[in-house]
């Protein structure tokens, strides 16, 4: 029976060596530390020398069974002579100074929801003060003020969970280098549900939002982050032109095979990685691989003029983006205009299509060179009474009253606040966050819905949510 209890304990830092299970009493499991060494809590130095042992009883839960862990605690001597703490007790994960483990307190708090703590304690056979402690901790966590979770910068990107059907939207903080949240889908509903988790003041603190060139993302970010500077991600923009160069290379391989022999297409394939490298990096590479790639680029560009022009266009775009990284807005705009004219004049279809992206996302791409502006303060709450707010405005003669306000000035922002949706809302639940009333005072989201497409999530969304949440929390690739 000891082996069976040991498997169900789920603890890697303890060994079970005896179990006492008497009828009508709580099972007692005698455990001891598994590791030979322990870290000093003061200096974090490992120690192996012990100075005696002691016993301690702790209430724990194995699934739904309440047990008593009789822990053999060793007393270690710190081997670091400079440490001020000479001895320390062995510590275990999830077991503090109290008489119940963190796992047991969480289990007690779940059982005590809506029930009297004395009745739950009597049913479980544990003292009442453990139930009161568990409920108090749960209430303190629920009512504690939430720490600011959004930074000054927010990055929005999509990831494929299973191509080409299952996608998710990833929200990350570039400054901290952490993932903030993950939502299923790659439409505006994912951003709308994510914004509903934060207050208007938190969203007003976001200064820069970088994203892929995806129209639903841009339209929804304008609604929920009205004060943020939208920046097109340079990586995705550059990848568009690299994909265009790849299309030209594949078409050039057929032309080279048709004019220079059946096996000549291998020259274009051999240069597929060298064409994507930056010219400065390729010329600075003094290795044998660099010399071989330079020769491959020179040979394939000499065989096909259109591929040579496409390669020069790719390098011209890299030069234009260098002005953007330097922060020179005027030169960056001039370089983009020149590059757009070169793409249209080249008559290369993939580059003409990619150049259309520069025109549609001109403002967001130029923002790549602009510094982030400080966030605009939100509207101050009105202190006037309801009678003053509801009073109809009366016309006054010039000079005898206050000047009439322009139609553009407004006390309140016209941007609707996202509804408090669930953490991962479905598309049909996020289609009418302002209500189904057609005469709503703020129908901006409903009237502008035709500007982007909300994809309906198919069956199995709950399974995808559990998969995404499990991967985000555990960091393990769960299938």
Image (cartoon, rainbow, N blue to C red):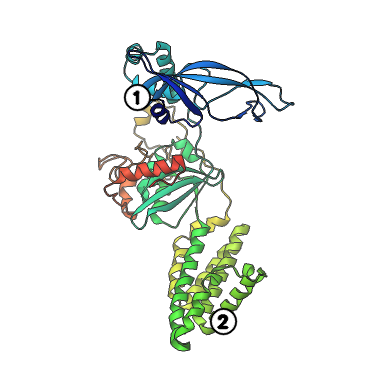
Q: Report the residue marked by disc 1.
A: 64
Q: What kind of element bears circle 2?
A: helix
Q: Reply above or below: 40 against 55.
A: below
Q: Nearer the viewer, residue 1 or 282?
A: 1
Q: Nearer the viewer, residue 407 or 446?
A: 446
Residue 5: image quadrant is top left
Q: Reply above or below: 44 against 232.
A: above
Outermost residue, right side: 82
- The residue located at (56%, 43%) in the rendering is 176
Residue 457 image point, x, y percent: 29, 49
Q: What kind of element bears circle 1?
A: loop
- The reply to whether callout 2 and callout 1 are in contact (CB within 8 Å) is no
Give the distance between the C-alpha atoms of the residues marked 2 and 1, in whole angstroms: 72 Å
Tell me, yes or no, if residue 164 can be seen here. yes
Q: Nearer the viewer, residue 77 or 154?
A: 77
Q: Report the residue marked by disc 2.
A: 299
Q: Residues within 10 Å of mark 1 (few under 14, many from 20)?
A: few
Q: Earlier in the sequence, mark 2 or mark 1?
A: 1
Tell me, yes or no, if residue 415 can be seen here. no
Residue 296 image point, x, y percent: 57, 77
Q: Nearer the viewer, residue 195 or 359?
A: 195
């Amino acid at each position: 029976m000891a082996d069976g209890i040991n498997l169900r304990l789920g603890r890697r830092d303890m060994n079970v060596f005896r179990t006492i299970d008497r009828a009508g009493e709580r099972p007692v499991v005698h455990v001891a530390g598994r590791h030979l060494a322990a870290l000093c809590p003061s200096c974090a130095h490992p120690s192996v020398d012990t100075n005696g042992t002691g016993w301690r009883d702790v209430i724990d839960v194995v699934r739904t069974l309440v047990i008593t862990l009789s822990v053999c605690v060793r007393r270690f001597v710190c081997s670091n002579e400079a440490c001020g703490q000479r001895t320390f007790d062995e510590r275990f994960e999830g077991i503090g100074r109290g008489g119940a483990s963190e796992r047991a307190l969480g289990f007690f708090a779940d059982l005590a929801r809506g029930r009297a703590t004395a009745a739950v304690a009597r049913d479980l056979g544990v003292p009442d003060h453990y139930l009161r402690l568990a409920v108090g901790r749960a209430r303190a966590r629920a009512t504690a003020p939430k720490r600011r979770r959004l930074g000054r910068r927010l990055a929005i990107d999509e990831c494929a969970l299973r191509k080409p059907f299952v996608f998710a939207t990833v929200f990350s903080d570039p400054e901290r280098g952490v993932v903030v949240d993950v939502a299923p889908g790659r439409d505006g509903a994912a951003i709308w549900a994510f914004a509903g988790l934060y207050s208007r003041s938190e969203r007003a603190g976001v200064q820069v939002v970088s994203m892929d060139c995806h129209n639903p993302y841009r339209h929804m970010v304008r609604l929920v982050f009205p004060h943020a500077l939208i920046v097109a991600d340079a990586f995705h923009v550059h990848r568009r032109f690299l994909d265009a160069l790849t299309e030209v290379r594949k078409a050039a391989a057929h032309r080279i095979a048709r004019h220079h022999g059946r096996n000549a297409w291998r020259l274009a394939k051999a240069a597929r990685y060298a064409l994507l490298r930056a010219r400065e990096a390729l010329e600075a590479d003094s290795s044998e691989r660099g010399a071989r790639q330079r020769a491959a680029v020179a040979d394939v560009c000499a065989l096909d003029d259109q591929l040579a022009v496409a390669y020069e266009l790719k390098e011209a775009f890299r030069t234009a983006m260098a002005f953007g990284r330097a922060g020179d807005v005027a030169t960056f705009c001039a370089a983009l205009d020149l590059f757009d004219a070169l793409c249209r004049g080249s008559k290369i279809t993939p580059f003409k299509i990619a150049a259309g992206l520069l025109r549609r996302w001109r403002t967001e791409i130029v923002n790549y060179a602009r510094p982030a502006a400080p966030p605009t303060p939100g509207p101050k709450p009105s202190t006037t009474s309801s009678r003053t707010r509801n009073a109809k405005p009366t016309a006054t003669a010039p000079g005898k009253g206050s000047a009439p306000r322009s139609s553009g000035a407004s006390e309140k922002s016209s941007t609707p606040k996202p509804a408090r949706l669930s953490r991962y809302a479905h598309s049909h639940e996020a289609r009418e966050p302002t209500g189904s009333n057609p005469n709503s005072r703020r129908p901006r989201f409903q009237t502008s819905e035709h500007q982007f497409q909300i994809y309906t999530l198919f069956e199995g969304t709950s399974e995808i949510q559990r998969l995404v949440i499990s991967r985000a929390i555990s960091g393990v690739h769960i299938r």
